[in-house]
Image: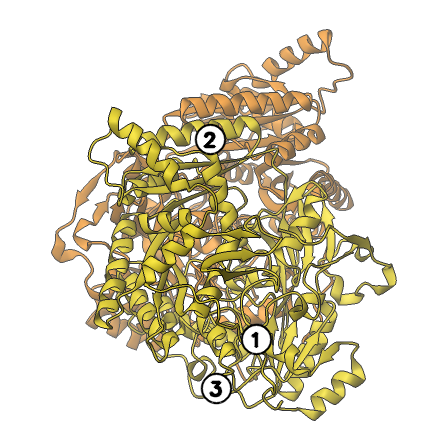
Chain colours: A orange, B yellow
Amino acid sequence: MAAKRNAVTTEAPESSAPGEGTALALDSRLSKRVESVIPKKRHEALKWFGWGYNDSQFYGKDGIICFRGEKYPLGGCELPSFTKWVEKKFDLRVDITKQYPQLPRTYPRPVENAPFLHELKGTTQVDYSAEGIDRLVRCHGQTLNDIYSLWHHKFRRIPDLVVWPRCHDEVVQLVRLAHKHNVMLVPFGGGTSVSGAITCPQNESRMICALDTSQMNRLLWLNRENLTVCFESGIVGQDLERVLRSEGLTVGHEPDSYEFSTLGGWVATRASGMKKNVYGNIEDLVVRVRMVTPSGTLERECSAPRVSCGPDFNHVILGSEGTLGVITEVVLKVRPLPSVRRYGSLAFPNFEQGVLFMREVARRRCQPASVRLMDNEQFMFGQALKPEKSWWAGVVDAMKQRYVTSWKGIDLNQICAATLLFEGDLKDVQRQEALIYEIAEKFEGFPAGGQNGERGYILTFVIAYIRDFGLHQGIVAESFETSVPWDRCSLLCRSVKQRVVSECSKRSINYYTISCRVTQTYDAGACIYFYFGFRSTDVADPVELFEAIEHSARDEILSCGGSLSHHHGVGKIRSHWYRNAVTETGSSLYSAAKRHLDPKNIFALGNLLPLEEAHPTAEASPPPATPSTPPKAKL
Amino acid sequence: MAAKRNAVTTEAPESSAPGEGTALALDSRLSKRVESVIPKKRHEALKWFGWGYNDSQFYGKDGIICFRGEKYPLGGCELPSFTKWVEKKFDLRVDITKQYPQLPRTYPRPVENAPFLHELKGTTQVDYSAEGIDRLVRCHGQTLNDIYSLWHHKFRRIPDLVVWPRCHDEVVQLVRLAHKHNVMLVPFGGGTSVSGAITCPQNESRMICALDTSQMNRLLWLNRENLTVCFESGIVGQDLERVLRSEGLTVGHEPDSYEFSTLGGWVATRASGMKKNVYGNIEDLVVRVRMVTPSGTLERECSAPRVSCGPDFNHVILGSEGTLGVITEVVLKVRPLPSVRRYGSLAFPNFEQGVLFMREVARRRCQPASVRLMDNEQFMFGQALKPEKSWWAGVVDAMKQRYVTSWKGIDLNQICAATLLFEGDLKDVQRQEALIYEIAEKFEGFPAGGQNGERGYILTFVIAYIRDFGLHQGIVAESFETSVPWDRCSLLCRSVKQRVVSECSKRSINYYTISCRVTQTYDAGACIYFYFGFRSTDVADPVELFEAIEHSARDEILSCGGSLSHHHGVGKIRSHWYRNAVTETGSSLYSAAKRHLDPKNIFALGNLLPLEEAHPTAEASPPPATPSTPPKAKL
């Protein structure tokens, strides 16, 4: 995946941050600059109008969908099965005449705060830009709405200025200046948010300054004895892992966005990684974290592994979604690189059997690094994406063979598949494999080959490119996710899919796909991902329509006992439900913390609570004198 | 340990809490009343003047220390080795003529808030008492200072009233009334705090009401599919485990206090259990929790296993130490009872080798349910406590044998020991055992028998009784704990012991014991327990002296990179350091949350921040306009 080779250079002592900026540093002279695959001018490598690298893209040629992009195994492939799947599913022909959008010729006129700019230039060394393209590519994340707005030049508000602090101390300076001059700040990491979290609020009248963390990406120290490492927050996942790999180590945090998303973004959204079963989710990996707020730097004073020292404010920083301050430095746990990595896959007669298998694996706590279960629709979609002889065909062959000998009543439109990734010592991996296949058999599952599993995981990073191609061809598509207790898992999957079907039917949408997968398992429940897309060629505002249906689906999720989000966060697009999710008392506690840490609301992103509710003045909203009635819970 | 048999009865539907009180309940008719081993009048079973059951106690007979108490395996034993150890270590003879203290004849006159009492009696069904003994036994926890103050009738302020709410709704009523009438509330669970957390503030002028949670101890529901259970917060550990064991399940949370401490107390202090390697610490076990505050009930709306939904307020409730509200109901994870439980022990030539072993076990993440490492002093103390032929002798025999054949330069005054507890399936346990003994060998450790390990664990619950006997005989002794990164572990142990030695020397204390053990291991560090005691027969105020030395030891811990507390919490006795531990920004965020949730400071316990700092009015302490300088960190 990594475009460039590892490039770690030791930095001269004099250029490292002095004084208060080194609180998490063992010895700042040990810090290493990391050459990133993403340049400072990010649009030179990344699409301004969509997901991923400029040189990586789905496109149509001679009526066939192809993929270009050397960074991915699918690069240079023609995809006839996928073409057929798309054409049949959406009743359309691949149109190769369509153009991707052109950059706008003009950009919104910037709001300027002259005293802020004056002091920025006069008292700091912070680099900045007011160029239109620098501003445009930092005005949004990667929601369908963001991309659609870009394509149609719909953004009224984009950052008025971009700044690139190089260390914690420069962030302290910036936050101080922004607070002093009442300038709004948007902490900008990898720009991969799918919750609207970093999208500029369109009604902000103050100057908006995008604080780009990309130049804060040093490895500050590595402690092999403790297996801990300190990075600046702006490092992107692939850079972080490349640097550690060269030291024989890994953090092991691999959200699907990890090529482009940053450490700071992971903390701010409470990210989850594909291999969390071995390495943990971000909250399990973080030992210590610093966040600069207008009221000071929030951090813990010591690096002890577990403490009982009052409320744990790491968990206030985790999930703060840019609304409370800027995350600057993070101490993470690392692990030795596993000696063995193996893939596997399983097929089950139906989704419910697959869920029972997943539940049993979780009950016995024998999850491999990753285990994912796809429903039938997604299984077929996945195999269609493969350039060679399809997985599907192979599995069907095996099913048929089995069917003759021992199986009865198998419905090929019902079967589903799980992909497996094992990491560890050879002995551990072998034991895990034996146990997993033994459990699978109890639920009528059987092995469908390691190669199939591997291809499933490799596709993960390419799938994100499909959305833009779909939009280009007149299909709007996006994923959404939740977490749910085990006893509601199958019910929730069924109900949400039914709800989407009925919403489509109500709106005379005839060509669509809705599918789901179970991507994470826990002691008490699982994470479910839904993929939904429909043909929008006849629709006036396809994104509005998509959002209306997604909104219904979320209502259905909540009424089935699912959560507002497992790992994408609340952002703006789910802020409607936040108050109910944490109850009135919780949302007012969030507001109180926000008022305290950011009294002028310079981080006015409108995440979690909608902007009009997020920041009432202290006078306008005194705490209620008597306990309020919490809303009725789902369970 | 459990005195009474399991007694679960189904409760009639009409008596379960209605309406908002059932938010965490699947079906309130499923709730089961649990008959507790601790009666409502707790002093009928538990000592008013010290630790544990009335019928369990160390005492002297014919110059020999003995232990009485049927509930423990040591009950009825004479302890000649222990007697010798005590007499030699502290240069004194066991005095059997001394008396345990007598109950006071009078109690401090209660402060009365007539309107509160009037409304309590008129509008609620909550049971209450103003009897002196009920008030006295709920005025304190189990610090040395608490017990010494009891013995010497030193408490000026004790609760003016005790109330026994029976469910969440009654707690809501009580908090509403207390807030309305400005009455201070002390949430009182098992009374086992060793941080001063529940000790009444001696300068409180308002009426103090102890809110005893012991009558809120129902099992509200059990969900076998999700392996989750909901208990009211007042259930004590042994009752909780007994009820679950009868269902083939366990939570597996076993702090040393678990016979008497409550679920609510575990959450409020961020407790850690002996077997956390399998079951997790309390923060890993809690799925959902309700806390009643004057500004409403704080809780999450759904039971999904992991969410990304803004700051996680469970982690504000965890560690809140009674200062923000009353924890009423908790959803916990449960596990099937393990089929196999086995003990083991290891001996190492010295403590440093033992620490290296512990570090390697953590690095390879193969910790058994429990692994503890004792230093030489503590090892000898432990073996002295055994009534039969000592473990020590057995180990020494084995050492000598080894010595002849393969060991060189072993110093019997240097060797240390680890105890092991394995739980799980037979195969898992066997694999763990093989791996642990293999790793031990790398660090010159060798197996010292399962029986020795088992006796070590069994003694855990008896050791807590020693403190009172010591006090009775003129020895003050107490433990304190911390957590620390691996690379500072040996250094910290050495430095803290040296510091205590030097503090004793400075004060001409010649007879004392200072020892340590590593009780928990994590990826990035460990928990260390210190035991310190000295002969105080010639000292005017032994507790003051003890606290001065403990204070120095804590300074030493912090300067070695250790934490303020691993699991006992901050309470009052460590509030001096809280601000530094979480930095100015953290402590002011705590204060802001406190002001918001408890604007009249009815939970004025003085934990975390000293009382005079904890609750400045909003006007007196505006958030600083510019980021403040964080104090310099240790690492």
Q: Is residue B257 left or right of residue B532?
A: right
Q: Residue B127: which quarter of the image?
A: bottom right
| Viewer-side label of 2, 1 | 2
The residue carrying mark 2 is B432
List the residue tagged with mark 3.
Answer: B617
Q: Earlier in the sequence, mark 1 or mark 3?
A: 1
Q: Amino acid at mark 1?
A: Leu
Q: For the residue marked with disc 3, what is the amino acid?
A: Thr
- Location of residue A106 in the rendering, given as x and y in whole percent from the top left corner: 39, 58
Tell me, yes or no, if residue A42 can be seen here: yes
Q: Nearer the viewer, residue A72 or B262?
A: B262
Rendered location of residue A163, percent (x, y): 30, 61
Q: Which of the 4 image quarters holds residue B393?
A: top left
**Residue under disc 1 on the same chain as residue under disc 3:** yes
Q: Which residue is mark 1?
A: B597
Could you tell me which quadrant the N terminus of chain A lies in?
Answer: top left
In this rendering, do the residues under marks 2 and 1 share a single chain?
yes
Residue B227 screen position, x and y as percent = 66, 43
Q: Earlier in the sequence, mark 2 or mark 1?
A: 2
Q: Is residue B581 above or below residue A44?
A: below
Q: Amino acid at mark 2?
A: Gln
SS of the residue at dot 2?
helix
Residue B222: which disc? Answer: none
- Near mark 3 (Cα within 10 A), the count class, few <14, some 14-19 or many ≥20, is few
Mark nearest the camera among 2 and 3 is: 2
Q: Nearer the viewer, residue B530 or A327?
A: B530
Most foreground residue, B108 or A626:
B108
Say which chain tag 3 marks: B
Mark 1 neighbour density, 10 Å: few (under 14) some (14–19) many (20 or more): many
Depth order, front residue of B125/B107:
B107
